[in-house]
Amino acid sequence: MPDEDLKPIKVLVVDDSAFSRQTIKTILQKVPNVEIVGVAVNGQDGMRKIINFKPDVVTLDLEMPEMDGFTLLRWVMQERPLPVIVVSSHGDDPTVFKALELGAVDVVIKPTARASRELKEIESDLIRKVVGASSLQLEKLKRSISLLEKRKVINGSDFSGHSEIKMVAVGSSTGGPTALQSILTRLPGNFPSMIVISQHMPRGFTRQFADRMDKLCALYVKEADQGEPIEAGKVLICPGGYHLMFQRLKGKIFVLLKESATSDRYIPSVDIMMKSIAEVYGPRTMGVLLTGMGNDGKEGMLEIKKQGGFTIAESEETAVVFGMPREIILAGGADKIAPLEKIPDEIMKRMKRDEKQNNY
C-alpha cells in the first residue's frame, strides 16, 4: 500500500456506466494516496475534465456514446500525454489490444455485479495497475510502441534450429503486451526452443492476446491448455487467473495450470512459472524479465541462474516500469542487461552460441 506521505495520485474515471464509475471510485478511494478528481460519462466529457483537473492517471472505457474511448485516447497521446488504463468487459475483443498499441498502458476487467471472488480480483488488479501507472515514463512507452512499426524478423537462415536451451521463460507486467509483441515478432520461425510467458493480465484477455500474437509472429502462439505437451517452436501464454507450471510424466513434460487464489499478489505469477521450469529443465533454461511494477520474477530468475540457466533483464533505458527488472539486477541475478530492442538479438545470440558449442 502506498505511503500516506507521498503526493496523491490524481485519477479521472471515464465510463458511460454509472455502476462502473461508482465501483471504480469505491475501489480506488480505499487507497490513501489515490484521489478521484472527477468522473466523465464519455470521451468529450473526459477531454474537458483532463484539461481542467490535470489527472495523473485515467481509467478509460472504450465503448461510449458521442465520443468513444479510442478518440479520447488518440487525443490524450497527442495533446496531453498521461497514463491511460483501459477498463473493458470484452477480453475477446481485439480492439483492447489496439488500444495498447495506441498508447494505453494496461487493461483491467470492467466491474460488474459478479461473485465476490471475481470482484476481489478486479479490486487488487485495478489498485496495483493504477499505482504502477502513476510511476511509469511515457517516453519509454512511446519508444516501445515505435518498435512495433520497425519489426523485422531476425534472419534464421544460418541457424540449424538446434540449441541446448530448451525453454525460454518470459515475465512481464505493466507495459508488457507491447514489449512482448516487439520481441516475439522478431524471432524466426525455426526458433529451436519453447517459449512460455506469464504476463500480468486478467481472466478473459489472454486468449485474445495469444491469438493476436499468433497472427503477427512467425512462431505459433497460443494460450496454454491443461496437460499440453511441450514442443519446440511454440509459444504458450499463461491464461489469466492461473499460474503456469510443468510436470514430468513417463519421461515427457506437460503443462500444469494451477488456479490462482485471491491472496496471490501477482497473477499469473512469473516466479511460480520460472521456478517450475528451473526444476524441470535446469541449465537448459533461459529467463527473460521485462517491464513491470513490483518484484515478481526475482526469485524465479535467481533459481534459473542457480540451476545454471541464462538470464536476461530489460534495462532501465527502455523499461516502462523498471520495478521487476531492477529487482533482479540489484540481486545480481541478471547475466545480461539489455534495452528492449536488443533482447531478441541477445536471445538468438545465446541460442546460436549453444548450438555452436553443441557441434564440438
Image: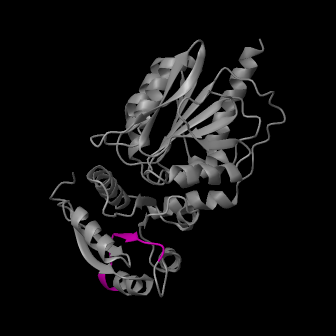
Residue found at x 46% / y 84%: 65
Residue 333, can we see it?
A: no
> Magenta stretch?
52-63
Q: Position of residue 40 (x, y in %)?
A: 34, 81
Q: Position of residue 278 (x, y in %)?
A: 49, 22
Tell me, yes or no, whether the highlighted magenta stretch contains residue 191. Answer: no
**Residue at the right extreme?**
157
Quick check: 247 left or right of 284? left
Q: Position of residue 167 (x, y in %)?
A: 60, 27
Q: Nearer the viewer, residue 114 or 194?
A: 114
Determine the image quadrant of residue 85.
bottom left
Query: Could you tell me which quadrant the C terminus lies in?
Result: top right
Q: Position of residue 354 (x, y in %)?
A: 69, 21
The relative height of residue 286 versus residue 50 in the rendered view (above or below) is: above
Residue found at x 36% / y 42%: 266
Q: Nearer the viewer, residue 128 or 206?
A: 206
Residue found at x 47% / y 18%: 279
The relative height of residue 21 versus residue 133 in the rendered view (above or below) is: below
Tell me, yes or no, whether the highlighted magenta stretch contains residue 62. Answer: yes
Residue found at x 76% / y 39%: 189
Determine the image quadrant of residue 25.
bottom left
Residue 134, can we see it?
A: yes
Q: Nearer the viewer, residue 304 or 106?
A: 106
